[in-house]
Image (tube, grey):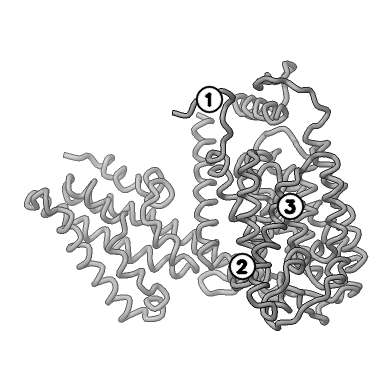
Amino acid sequence: MTSQRTLFQEFKKGIWAENPVIKMLLGMCPALAVTNSAVNGLAMGLASTFVVICSSAIVSIIRRFVPGGVRIPTYIIIIAGFVTLADLFLRAYFPVISKALGPYVPLIVVNCMIMGRAEFFASKHPVVPSILDALGTGTGFVWVLVVLGSIREILGSGSIFGVTLLSERIYTPWVVMILPAGAFLSLGLLIALINYLTQRRQGAH
Amino acid sequence: MMDKTRQVGEESKAGARGSTPGGSGDGPLIVSSSPHLLTADNIPKIMHSVVAALLPACAVSIYFFGIRALLLIAVSVAACIATERAIQRFLGKPSTIADGSAIITGILLALTLPPSFPLLGAVLGSVFAIAIGKHIFGGLGYNIFNPALLGRAFLQAAYPVLITTWVEPFTRGFDVDAIAAATPLALMKFEGQMTPHLDLLFGNISGSLGETSAVAIIIGGLYLRYKGYINWKLPLGYLGSMAFFGGIFWLMNPSRYPDPLFHVLAGGAMLGAWFMVTDMVTSPTTPKGQWIFAIAAGAIAVIIRLFGGLPEGVMYSILLLNSVVPLINRWTRPKVFGEVSS
């Protein structure tokens, strides 16, 4: 059926070429809302990755039994189930992070990235490619959220993963970076930078 | 008009060739619609007149706040020029430092900062103003927002405490942290205390560098009007609108709200009206649109001053209206002569 090489490509494409946040602009709500620190970005990324892998696997398994008319509600129920799992897990084992993420963990249900993978990939492909596709997409989501969270935490709080890099005496943190405006600014500039690099690389070929 | 066409031509040429700025001998093709009128004005000439018009305000701020004010202005201007040069070199575009627009952005930004503001913060604001405010959009002529105000807005959001720490005038030297004072607008808003109009007029008050003396700014504004680089509509519409809407509330309750003259003289109203509302790039081009722009901005400034969370609303009022300028321009497009309405 599918060769090894294409399986690896299914995984790889989500990390850069079809990255959910920087290329497809999906999942912007969590990418903007919870990336005020690197830890929050990482937690949100990992939770979403867990949900997208599990839901893609289930959607792929049952893809032949779901009538077309009710497929979206079906996907949402499947996704909601895994989101509840992730939410309860975070609350039980990482209460501080769970509190910091607030309503954004339950809101993973409506993350377009997860719905997109179910609708465009998992519902049309066998289980193994679907899982790899979800894994790649999730990895792409995690790295962007961690990078965004790191930029905003370094500039807005002078620390990274809670470790102080720049003390208050030598650096006055830019309060704006941990506010919503800072999220839009950093995400916009990050996408601009990546588009610029991509264009330059295409121009060089 | 003609300069803008020329600039567009140059830029598209540079873009088409990749990174070879100004390498060829053939000049850019200038296309503009008739009637053609030759004028001696060009971007550098206008910009340098604006710099000259800002000198009285700079001189007054240095008189009141000493070496600190001079340093802030110098650092901002230097940072703006350096940022512009760096970005244009990086993008392989021809250098436009000589046109003086970066100098104006630097001076205007410095004039909106409190005298005790850290110099490194001024550098940050300048970099933001030029890089994000101007070059992200494609450079001079393409920017949506007034770059200096955008830099100031970023600093306001980044350093909310530092940018609202004011000092009394005649606080000299570097060690200015100890003496704090409230601006006339803050006194009015939070303590119900008024500042005499004469102090507002001549500048013996605390505030940003360019907020102190209304007279110095009016002199610069009148000079620009005399040179014909700004028209009456924008500054008078803005100040008139502030006086009008401020006056309505004053008539309703004179003990609670300040009088119209106070609105016009206090805070950044004068600087905004003469040098930021009139920004050629970020204000409407049609006469009707200019009235709409100025009056709406003035009303918003008064609303923020009287009912908003901040004591001063000039910056946000102008930035807010900047964002709808394309819409205003489209909406108020004059009829072509002989056009029949369908």
Q: Nearer the viewer, mark 3 or mark 2?
A: 3
Depth order, front residue of A6/B41: B41
Q: What secondary structure is marked by label 1?
A: loop
Q: Position of residue B194 (x, y in %)?
A: 77, 78
**Callouts 3 and 2 close, C-beta under 8 Å:** no
Q: Position of residue B8 (x, y in %)?
A: 65, 29
Identify the mark at residue B304; answer none if there is no mark: 2
Q: Which residue is mark 3?
A: B236
Disc 2 from disc 1: Cα separation: 41 Å
Left or right side of A92 for A200: right
Chain bearing tag 2 is B
Q: Is residue B272 above or below residue B1?
A: below
Residue at figure coordinates x 23%, y 67% from the top left: A82
Quadrant assignment, res A61: bottom left
Disc 1 from disc 3: Cα separation: 31 Å
Work out whether mark 3 precedes mark 2 in sequence or the reverse, and give the earlier one: 3
Q: Residue furthest front?
A: B251
Chain bearing tag 1 is B
Residue at figure coordinates x 76%, y 51% from the top left: B275
Q: Which residue is mark 1?
A: B339
Disc 3 from disc 2: Cα separation: 19 Å
**Callouts 1 and 3 close, C-beta under 8 Å:** no
Q: Position of residue B110 (x, y in %)?
A: 78, 59
Amino acid bearing label 3: Leu
Whether residue A17 is visible here, answered yes or no, is yes
Residue at figure coordinates x 37%, y 45% from the top left: A18
Confirm whether circles 1 and 3 share one chain.
yes
Which quadrant, please, contains the N terminus of chain B?
Answer: top right
Whether residue A170 is visible here, answered yes or no, is no
Q: Position of residue B325 (x, y in %)?
A: 58, 45
